[in-house]
Amino acid sequence: MIALLVRDMRLAMRAGGGFGLGLAFFLIVSTLVPFGVGPEAAILSRIAPGILWVGALLACLLSLDRIFQLDFEDGSLDLLATAPIPMEGTVAIKALAHWLVTGLPLTLAAPAFGALMNLQSPGHYWIFVTLLIGTPALSMIGAFGAALTVGLKRGGLLLSLLVLPLYIPTLIFGAEAATRGTAGLSALTPLLIMAGITAGSVALLPFAAASALRINLR
Amino acid sequence: MSLWEFANPVRFMALSGKVLPWVIGLTALTLIPGLIWGFFFTPEAVNFGNSVKIIYVHVPSAMMAINIWVMMLVTSLIWIVRRHHVSVRAAKAAALIGVTMTVIALITGAIWGEPMWGTYWAWDPRLTSFLILFLFYLGYMALWAAIENPDTAADLTSVLCIVGSVFALLSRYAVNFWNQGLHQGASLSMDKEEHVADVYYLPLLLCLAGFVLLFIALVLIRTRTELRLVRLHRLEIRERMKDA
């Protein structure tokens, strides 16, 4: 399983695109939003946590189809299916690899990008904490969506249509916790609910994703 | 004799063919008088004026939009557990009706909201949940449309429906948490503590029954079409195998 994790991360980094592309996209979104809404510092600092969350979510979406697509095309997914690791384990490892190369860098970069949007001082801390807890759920839900659409030729657009509605609860609680934290209110309730969503997704979705993969490999 | 015998497509076709005219007749008998009664023979409400009459379309369609998703969840589960073709075809048939009901509920709600709240749209929990439900229907139907092999499509959409239901429910509570709303509370309830006055209640009940029957009629028609499509697909494959 560790070998698979290492392999997936190496592929993602060397293929060029997976690792840097998400971050670059996130940076561009954070740059474009002030152009769209105007440079007033007060408005920007109020919407900053929400924009950072939406930006991170979209950046996460970009690389989802790579989770299974390439392995499906060159046949290594069939080998993984017959390997001694259960399919659920493969899915979980692949989601973890996706998180390590997209979710984690986004989380680390988000407080810095917050400066572009005049994020006020406790906000850096809160955006980091909420993204750290929330992005694993995004990767796991995304892996489920990728497993559903792996057999399709042009699955990319369909993948976003399937996955984005599933992202809604995580986004609501994550952005709410970040906004509340930034405003100096108690953010414990949304934070805990979001942690619950992450824990539930990581625990249960590998089973759903694995069954979808088995159907697609049939 | 058990219920599962009707899961045999041939038996289902025979039975549904016989039942269908009756269901259509009953739909006409409830929906048409219900709507006419509601639109022309009820007084204007004190605070709402004439706009109250949109309730006879708005409430039933909203109720059906949610219940159709629940029905799809149940039929998807039956497909996954027992692999009855009728079941999953019924889920597919219901999706288009469900999305139509959701759109009707959203549009009538917008038309009603304008004179009442002064806005077509507000990020109220109920409105938002319906928009989200609409997105879930779209995803489900898009997945059906994208996959060619009917059995693969049935399996994958069923998995999506089950996972989607969990997330749809989560979203429902999330938007409640996110924003407090304008929308009034439940207009109907079983214990007669809080609901609309009897003059509106009785035609509304008739309309609700009419919408349920309308849904049953439509879903039967569409399921029959779907089953015939599956059969056509199988026949085509058989012919091709013969040639080869």
Image (spheres, coloured by chain):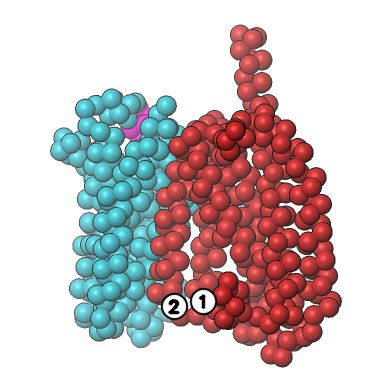
Quadrant containing the C terminus of chain A is: top left
* Observer able to see residue A160: no
Who's the residue at 72% across and 49% down the image?
A: B217
* B51 vs A217: above or below: below
Who's the residue at 46% across and 80% down the image?
A: B180
* B47 vs B84: above or below: below
Horizontal and vertical percent for residue B12? Answer: 67, 34
What hue does chain A carry in this figure? cyan
Q: Which mark is residue A117?
A: none
Q: Is residue A70 magenta?
A: yes
Given the current orientation, which residue lies at the most extreme left position?
Answer: A2
Q: Which residues are magenta?
A: A69-74
Disc with the residue nearer the chain's start (2 vs 1):
1
Q: Residues within 10 Å of mark 1 (few under 14, many from 20)?
A: some
Horizontal and vertical percent for residue A184? Answer: 25, 84
Q: Residues within 10 Å of mark 2 (few under 14, many from 20)?
A: few
What amino acid is at disc 2?
A: Asn
Question: Disc 2 vs disc 1: Cβ atoms closer than 8 Å?
Answer: yes
The residue singled out by tag 1 in the image is B124
Horizontal and vertical percent for residue B66? Answer: 56, 60
The residue singled out by tag 2 in the image is B179
Q: Chain of mark 2?
A: B
Chain drawn in red: B
